[in-house]
Structures are given as C-alpha cells and as structure tokens.
Amino acid sequence: MHILTGRARSDYLKKYPIDDFFSFDIQPYLEVCQFDKGEWIFQEGSFPDTLYYMLEGKAKLYMTHKNGKVSLIEYLKAPLFMGEIELLNEARYTKGIQTVTKTICYSITQSCKEKLLVDALFLRRLCLFLGEKATNMTAKYTQNQAYPLENRLAAFIQLSAEQGIYKEKHTEICEYLGVSYRHLLYVLAQFCEEQIVEKRKTGYHIIDKKRLAQLAQEIQ
C-alpha cells in the first residue's frame, strides 16, 4: 500500500468529495491509499483498525471454510466501504480482500471510531450501503436460481474483464456461479463459437461487446 500525498491526494479529494458523509471534519483522520494489483487490503483473520472507502478499482472477497477450502464470496467494485462490519463489531474478525486491479481508497483510521459511531449522518450513509449490499447478495442468489449460465457468465465477464480480457480461474468461478466445471467450459466454448469472445494465451478476449451486453442485460 502506498499513501498518496501532495497533488495526487488533492486531486482525488477533489474528484471524490467525501466531507458530506460526516457531520465532523474527517480530514485529520483520512488518507488516500493506492493498492497494487494482487495486494491484500485485508488478510483473512486479521483485526483491521481502518475503514476503507474504495474509489477506483476491483477486488475479491474470500473466505476459508473449516475444512480448509477457500471460496470466492463476492466480486467488489468501487464505490463501496470495506471494513464497515469490523468497525461496528468489537470482535473485528475479517474476511480476506485482495485487489484484482490497481485500487484507490480513502482510509479512515479507527482513532475516530467513537465519533463515527455517534455520527447520524455517517451512520445513515452506512445503513444505506449495508441495505444495498444485502439486496445485491439476495439478487445474486436468486439470479443463480432463475437465469441460465449464459446470462450470468456474460454479466460476470463484463464485471471482471480488464481491458477487454477475461482471465479468471475456472474453479473459482464455478463455485461462485454455482455450476459444474464442465458446464462452464461448455458455455465458454459456446461464446467462442458465436464469436462473442476469443480464447488466446492471455485469456478470453471480448470480440462482440454488444452481444455480451445483450446477454448480461437480461439479469440487470
């Protein structure tokens, strides 16, 4: 993680104003952070003392089960809070969050925790975020039941592709989308046959953005 200062800090504060999230001056408690691709924002099982607000970038939320299996729980995309549950919960046990692109965040130290927990303006903002987060998780579950893999995979490719290239691990995505490995490969092969994507050494390159968007739009 790198702390941005000077002009870089000022530019982000101007581009993504956050003062109206709070009823007190947040600036003394706030830093602008840059995480490189593949860097961990939170290590699973850690006890973070920072609340993050993602401004730009994408990340994955992981959880390790009792049997040692690691699952991809959610694909995170800016803007969103990270560490909000740990802020509210004294236990502060967290799941793992790893970036998949360069990611820019505001970090807010929990040295102002008491101020945050009595700030009606901030808590209202946090409640709205948590409500939307719960709605999205419910929607993801119902989509897995209601829509064919073609539509769900198209939406996921749109979400996770970087510079028009999709290259996620098949095993991770099978579990995330609730499908078999064979079924996933079948649909990817179908996308290749229809020239929606093209398989290359660097991953699956999106060829027909319009068709991919049409498939994804069915569940949006």
Image (spheres, grey):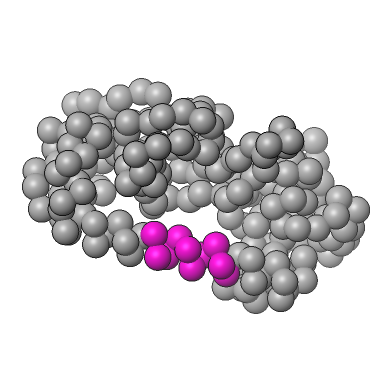
- What kind of secondary structure does the magenta stretch mostly adopt? helix
Q: Residue at the left extreme?
A: 24
Counting the numbered discs, the total is 0
User: Left or right: where does residue 156 sit relative to residue 48?
Assistant: right
On screen, 181 above or below 195? above
**Is 138 included in the stretch rendered in magenta?**
yes
Front residue of 211 and 153: 153
Residue for point 90% across, 53% down = 182
Query: Splitting the image into 4 quarters, where does residue 218 fall?
Result: bottom right
From the image, which quarter does the N terminus lie in? top left
Query: Splitting the image into 4 quarters, where does residue 100 fall?
Result: top right
Front residue of 14 and 179: 179
Residue for point 46% across, 36% down = 93
Q: Where is residue 128 in the image (x, y as percent from the top left)?
A: 33, 64
On screen, 35 above or below 166? above
User: Left or right: where does residue 121 sit relative to residue 85?
Assistant: left
Residue for point 64% across, 66% down = 141
Residue for point 19% across, 46% down = 116
Q: Residue at the top extreme?
A: 2
Using the rendered image of the protein, determine whether residue 155 is visible from the camera's viewpoint.
Answer: yes
* Chain part drawn in magenta: 130-139
User: Left or right: where does residue 206 sit relative to residue 24?
Assistant: right
**Is 220 included in the stretch rendered in magenta?**
no
Q: Where is residue 34 in the image (x, y as percent from the top left)?
A: 38, 30
From the image, which quarter does the C terminus lie in? bottom right
Q: Where is residue 194 in the image (x, y as percent from the top left)?
A: 84, 64
On screen, 183 above or below 202? below
Q: Where is residue 146 in the image (x, y as percent from the top left)?
A: 71, 76
User: Left or right: where does residue 180 sit relative to residue 215?
Assistant: right
Using the rendered image of the protein, determine whether residue 9 is visible from the camera's viewpoint.
Answer: no
Front residue of 89 and 85: 89
